[in-house]
Image: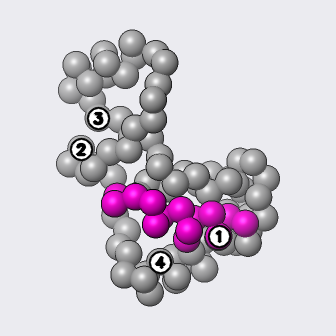
Amino acid sequence: GIAAEMTRRGYVYFDWNVESGDAAGYSSEGIYYRVVNGVDSCDYCVVLMHDIKPTTADALDSILYTLTRRGYTFATLDVNSPTAHHKIAN
């Protein structure tokens, strides 16, 4: 499949393991709660958010504030980052 071929060629791909719900139409408050509660289920979290959703932008400051106060840190993904992968059929 595509993912196996990407790996064979030396690429690293990332999925997410926390979904904000913004694409499903959740409100800013719903996005906030899905993210701040969703990060409890993973050691290394990759949160799926869409930059074109106004509700995501509205929730982001509160999410960052809450998670920073809980001791979370944020970083850019690179080839050495832990990956999150879903079961894929390709």
Q: Are marks 2 and 1 in contact (CB under 8 Å)?
A: no
Residue 1 shown left or right of residue 37 in the figure: left
Which of the two labelled residues, at mark 4 and mark 3, occupies the earlier sequence position? Answer: 3
- Write down the residue under mark 1: 33
- Secondary structure mostly seen in magenta is helix
Magenta part of the chain: 30-44
What is the distance, in whole Å, between disc 2 and disc 1 at their CAs?
A: 29 Å
Image point (26%, 24%), residue name: 7
Q: Name the image quarter holding the N terminus.
A: top left
In this view, 20 is above or below 37: above
Q: Residue furthest front?
A: 41
Q: Are marks 4 and 2 in contact (CB under 8 Å)?
A: no
Q: Are marks 3 and 1 in contact (CB under 8 Å)?
A: no
From the image, state whether disc 2 or disc 1 is nearer to you.
Answer: 1
Please count the marks in the image. 4
Residue 88: x %, y % from top left: 47, 25
Q: Amino acid at mark 2?
A: Val
Which of the two labelled residues, at mark 2 and mark 3, occupies the earlier sequence position? Answer: 3
Residue 77: x %, y % from top left: 33, 52
- Write down the residue under mark 2: 79
- Write down the residue under mark 4: 67
Q: Amino acid at mark 4?
A: Leu
